Image (cartoon, coloured by chain):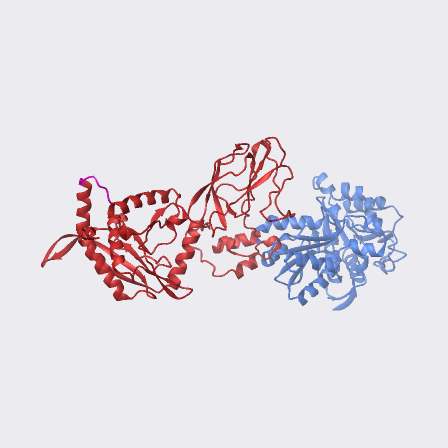
Chain colours: A red, B blue
Amino acid sequence: MPFTVYMPKLSPTMTEGVIAKWHKTIGDFVESGDVLLEISTDKATVEHAALDEGYLRAIIGQEGQKIDVNAPLAVFTEKPDESIEGYKAMPLGETPKAEVAPVAAPKASVPVVAKSQSKVLASPLAKKLAKEKGLDLASCTGSGPNGRIMSRDLAKAPAAQVAAPSEQMIVEEALSPMRQIIAQRLQESKSTIPHFYVRQEVDAAPIVALREELKRLEFSYTINDFIIKACAIALKKHPEINSGFDGKSLKALRFSRVDICVAVTVQGGLITPIVFDAAKKSLSTISQEMKQLASRAREGKLQPQEYQGGSFTISNLGMYGVNDMTAIINPPQGAILGVGAAQDVPVVKDGQVVPGKRMSLTISCDHRVIDGAEAAQFMRTLKQLIENPILFLSE
Amino acid sequence: MQVIDMREAIRQAIDEEMQRDKTVFIMGEEVAEYNGAYKVTKGLLDKWGPMRVIDTPISENGFAGIGIGAAMTGLRPIVEFMSFNFSLVAADQIISNACKMYYMSGGRFSVPIVFRGPNGAAAQVSCQHSHCVEAIYGNLPGLIIMAPSNAYNAKGLLKTAIRNNNPVLYLECELIYSDNMEIPTEEYLIPVGQANIVQKGKDITIVSHGRMVKLCKEACEKLQERGIEAELIDLQTVKPLDMETITESVRKTHFCVIVEEGHIFSGIAAEVAFQIQQHCLNDLDAEIARVCQHETPMPYSKVLEKETLPTVERILNACYETLALN
């Protein structure tokens, strides 16, 4: 009997997954527990193992393809030469219907490829006019047979783009699950949260010097490790910043623990793994955890509990040499710190212009839960810690 | 101006050209004593005498050949077929002599002859008397094919045909002989290869010829009720085609329906449609539609006869489908 393997539901919120990589090819015998494929969900890439043994006979979901949870991924048979002709791979919980594509028996191990994305159907005139006027046919709805776009449909198209001097080609790209989440969450954040910003320039010379000193002693830390440590101490001292806001219930959220999210750039987006209970962790523990989290994040191997939650976020673009950065709040948290590079600048000291090292810190706050004075006080504490890293020892 | 029917318009054209040119004569079955099977040649025998209005035996291949010989040797014959279906008996004369003589004689023999008579369906005359011949003859280089649709173009086209130095097939239709129309009393000619825009419109082009133009006009009125302005083109000359008028219209309307009384396969509509896509593919918003006679010999049954031929309803449906309005 042929049987179907379906897109698993890997997290409570998962509705679809992208096939990252097939580990087996058609004809392979797959044992129970063998890694069958890798699936990308909204934030992580997860290996999925076969539950039942069998021969992989048809691959329905190709690499890069987005598949709904419980939709068929592949067809297996118990015996290698069993026919799958006429076998219909149905989404879980559905009874066979006429429109479901039957799985063809692979001839010479040709995988069953899902229908490629349909090309835009347009009349010759509509195509000509669209080219002349620089219109994107894909954005039009056709009123002709089979939805074919006719010239009259172009007239209804909203806001026609004026043809640029050189032809502008726009390729519409489907968003990865991660980008969809980023787009949705940050749009919601920036459009619903009343952000305000407080910027503080700090003297970075002490932490840069401390880092050099530790390096000489063969302890490797990043500037960011110091920032995390400083924030952890400052947040403990200013619980009003270690807060959030629930936009639905309109209630302030007071976090008992300092859980610091750190934005990490990964292929196709970013993710914010968490240094839990950072206020209770030493600089070296923070540093080690951070190294591990960042590398696992880049491999797409973070588990949901490693990036879901947090009470405060740090986004550091200093490694790119930028002056400063203003970040968007990561809800339901109430604040995020944007960090610029430690830069060599002339500073005035005792009436004299001397070489200095300065770093710009910008906190974005949700005014519904945090006030300007509170943010300013927090920034003053943060400045004091960064400029006097010896205080790290006092905690 | 005068209000006359198409029959009279054809008669006037023959009469005027006989008056104008002594080499013009008419020949065919029942054209003289009986005044024509459809009374087109009424009174001509009395006026011009038996030397120029000649009754023939029932022998189309014979009198078509006589006509071609007369044309080659200086006369301008008008040969009437009682039905163009009978021209098939004379097909060898028409195809192998009339349309090829000028070429085969190296330009020494022109064949200034007009073959005329009713073409296509009448009322229940069955398949051997209902065929439309323009698609058959249209395939032959050397023939001019005209298809009048009303009294005005019937007269103007026939006079041009008689004066032309090439063989002309002039296709009439029994069902519209009695249709009246106001036309000028003064002389006028309609050039070979000139289509007529019967009605101007911007939404869809309808191309037709002969009796079908009448149905198309009705269809246009119905379309107008729905706010669709159709441009109706009457080919007048089927060959050579006036593609300039047609393409100009299609470039404006972007949609086209071609209506032909004859059969659909390799018909005149197919040729017109091919040339439209050749010249203005990128101006089309939809496939070109054809409304033609269904692929069957013409049934005798009145009901089936009607259903076999294009109808106003079929023309309208083709327009709606082409415009994707339903």
Q: Indicate the position of residue A355 as horizontal and vertical percent values.
A: 14, 52
- At x 18%, y 44%, the residue is A212
Q: Indicate the position of residue A382 as horizontal and vertical percent values.
A: 23, 57
Q: Does the magenta stretch include residue A139?
A: no
From the viewer's perspective, tell me whether residue B223 is left or right of residue A186: right
Q: Indicate the position of residue A61 as horizontal and vertical percent values.
A: 53, 42
- At x 57%, y 41%, the residue is A4
Residue A241, image quadrant: bottom left
In the image, residue A106 above or below residue B241: above
Q: Nearer the viewer, residue B269 or A321?
A: A321
Dominant secondary structure, magenta? loop
From the viewer's perspective, tell me whether residue B149 is left or right of residue A129: right
For the N terminus of chain A, the image quarter is top right
Q: Which of A305 and B109 is in front in this view?
A: A305
In the image, residue A35 above or below residue A316: above
Q: Bounds of the magenta span?
A: A216-222
Q: Can residue B40 be seen in this view?
A: yes
From the viewer's perspective, tell me whether residue A6 is left or right of residue A87: left
In the image, residue A55 above or below residue A134: above
